[in-house]
Amino acid sequence: MQIRRKSYFANTVESALALAAQELGDETLLVDSRRSKPEQAHLGAYEVIVEAPDATLEGDLKAGAVQQSAEYDRLLHDLASLRAEIGRLSKTLIRGAMIGSPQRWVLPSLAEIGQELLAADLPGDMTAELLGSFQAQNSFDANSSGLLVRRAFIAHCARAVQAGLESPRVMAVVGPAGAGKTTLLAKIAVKYGIAVQRGITFVNTDTHKIASGEQLRSYASILGSRFESVATVGSLARVLSSLRSGELVLIDTPGLGPGEMDLAPEWSSFFASNQAIEVHLVLTAPTRSADLLTSLTRWSQYRPARLAFTRLDETECYGGILAAAVASRLPLSFFSAGQRVPEDLQEASAAGLMNLLFGGQRATTSAAAA
């Protein structure tokens, strides 16, 4: 039996593993995962190396299979390159339509700001809308100071973002697999429960996967908090009815991929109809703005009240956060920029997001909170 080793590229490790399993089968084993090299970034943010048994490489079929695999790899590479080139051409066309005509913008500095926002992965239509509304609402002329215009535009942009918390009693986190929901709950528990001597109950609703709630159970044990695992909405309702006054309840939910949303209706209906539960949709900052906007639609059935973003330290492009906040009109609740509990957690703010977008630096918890 021959062992086949192969690399897969995607914007998340989970997506790369899914591609590997789809092609190589269920016996695929993870060997290594790492950030893609700069010259491979157009293929995906992460490279995952896997091994799998491949009996077809035996005997006379070996050469043909290897050649077919190489051709398939080249095809995938060419397809990824084509997509990247289409993306670059699209942005070029958007720039031409949006900032290429000097007559469109009274303020020359707006063209530079538009390029910054596009480079930060803010969609072209949203960039044009923000620039256009700013120009229409302000009385600057072509001789105005570029620095003054920039400061005014950042303030204008910040007004399009809502942020803040209302100290909910019951909080549920929903979102894609790998978004960091469980770790986020642990940070929230320490900062908004343990630190103020508030009772905490962790609730796990993912009972279909083996050991799915063990990480949350471990956090509860470490913090000396109550832990409940429920398989039905009725069980969750009974847990909520037994809460002590002032207790903070943190509900973890399973991460679902695009093809698994058929598992969501029962829980999403319960959350959407229970006004006592504040639902936070957890997304990752390195995700492309187009995919973030798709996620907003996919997870809308849960009726999220707020947006939380994790892994801010893994990207330098924060336009997707602004795009999601503006498109959803939901307040931002938390920014997480690391794994430390609870140090790498901050309440989100419009000023903090503007600092990330226009400050020219990678996120840290201090930058995200500024």
Image: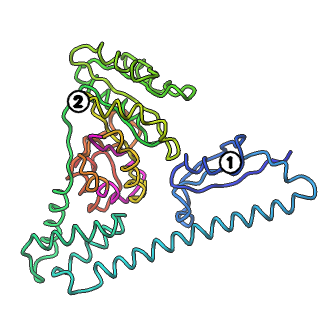
In the image, taking residue 56 as reference, residue 154 lies left or right, namely left
Q: Residues within 10 Å of mark 2 (few under 14, many from 20)?
A: some
Residue 311 on the magenta segment: yes
Q: Is residue 302 above or below residue 6?
A: above
Amino acid marked by disc 2: Pro
Instruction: Look at mark 1 in the image and give the residue it sits on.
Output: 50
Percent x, y for residue 69?
75, 61
Q: Which residues are magenta?
A: 304-323
Percent x, y for residue 324?
31, 54
Amino acid marked by disc 1: Val
Residue 337 shows in this picture? no
Instruction: Look at mark 2 in the image and give the residue it sits on.
Output: 168
Q: Is residue 93 above or below residue 59?
A: below
In the image, taking residue 229 as reference, residue 195 lies left or right, namely left
For marks 1 and 2 on the same chain, the one whose residue lies earlier in the sequence: 1
Quadrant in the picture for residue 70 = bottom right
Residue 95 shows in this picture? yes
Q: Residue at x 53, y 69 (%)?
A: 83
Give me the C-alpha separation between circle 1 and circle 2: 43 Å
